[in-house]
Amino acid sequence: MQPIISVIIPVYKVEAYLHQCVDSVLKQTWRGLEVILVNDGSPDRCGEICDEYAKKDDRVVVIHKENSGVSDARNLGIDKATGGFLVFVDSDDWIEEDMLELLYRTLTEHEADISCCGFFLAYENGVRPNNPVRGVFVYDTEQAIKESLIGKTVTVSPCWKLYKRSIFETIRYPDRFCEDAFVIVEVLSQAGRVVVDTAPKYYYRQRKVSRMHHAFNPKTMELVEAFEHNLAIIEKNYPDIADVGKAKVLRANLDVLRSLISSKDYKKAPAYKKLLAPLRDRYRFIMGHYFFSRSEKIVVTALKINVHLFKLLLSIHGLLQRNTKAAFD
């Protein structure tokens, strides 16, 4: 008998995508499955679709609840799971049929507590791997945390990972805008070893309505708060990588400021000076740290000189990105 892997899928307003998601999980080559569909009060037919799956396949467990957000849905799934291993899949995404088998094999072969795979960015007219690097990487706790801050082989997303259930014995997702970023360091701190096979097995759908693609709103500031929270943990327990934690906070400032400056009357926003000051005050740190790319250093230099120059560079960068995406589509 294969160990049971509990796949937790929060469901909300994804009627058009839910079949593809659930079908891809039920078709897994790994047969020891429990599929937990948490209907988070979805106003469309998602609840009915979930119930239809439960009638057809006894591996499917359906939970209906009032809408309270993805964190609460994931937490309820964790509480109800009976498997010794957990996997999270977003209900508008889908996975390769051997993803769970790959994750379990790499986890057991390397005696790890968390295993990760690569993923595709799935657009309307095609897919591309997020990371062109191929290989298997094994990290201890501190190395995994550092990698999660860099974001190349270990990401903050709870998806495309297999966790030993014990990882979540005391951890739950907070009701915050960037709930995954808030807990990533705590999650990885519970793992003695993390293994990554970068073969892409997860399809991460890029939807325009995704909340991470919205223009600035005050809750976007929680991204900065998330990495300030992580930095406090790192400085206490992993001081050797504190500089990377500080760099991640500054990059979060930069990312949120980019979003804010694209909005109208950005200078009147309470967050404007709070985001701008650290980037100017830590200019030398940013210029001297490998964490920041050449293009990031250029835009921070522009920001140091003049905010309008910074905004102009962002406009040019946005135009280049749109042209690149159009060519890809």
Image (tube, rainbow, N blue to C red):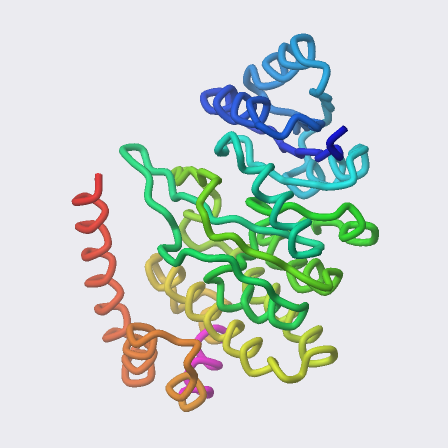
Residue at 75 percent of width and 61 percent of height: 190
Q: Residue 22 appears at what percent x and percent y?
A: 56, 23
Q: Residue 59 appears at what percent x and percent y?
A: 71, 20
Q: Is residue 319 above or below residue 255?
A: above
Residue at 31 percent of width and 33 percent of height: 124
Chief SS of the magenta region: helix
Q: Quadrant of the N terminus?
A: top right
The answer to which image quadrant residue 182 occupies is: bottom right
Question: As drawn, is 233 to the left or to the right of 45?
Answer: right
Q: Is residue 13 above or below residue 144?
A: above
Question: As drawn, is 170 to the left or to the right of 276?
Answer: right
Question: As drawn, is 6 to the left or to the right of 240?
Answer: right
Q: Residue 98 appears at what percent x and percent y?
A: 53, 34
Q: Please state which of residues 213 and 277 is positioned toward the viewer in this rendering.
A: 213
Q: Is residue 171 above or below residue 72?
A: below
Q: Which residues are magenta?
A: 274-283
Q: Please state which of residues 262 and 194 is positioned toward the viewer in this rendering.
A: 194
Residue at 74 percent of width and 48 percent of height: 164
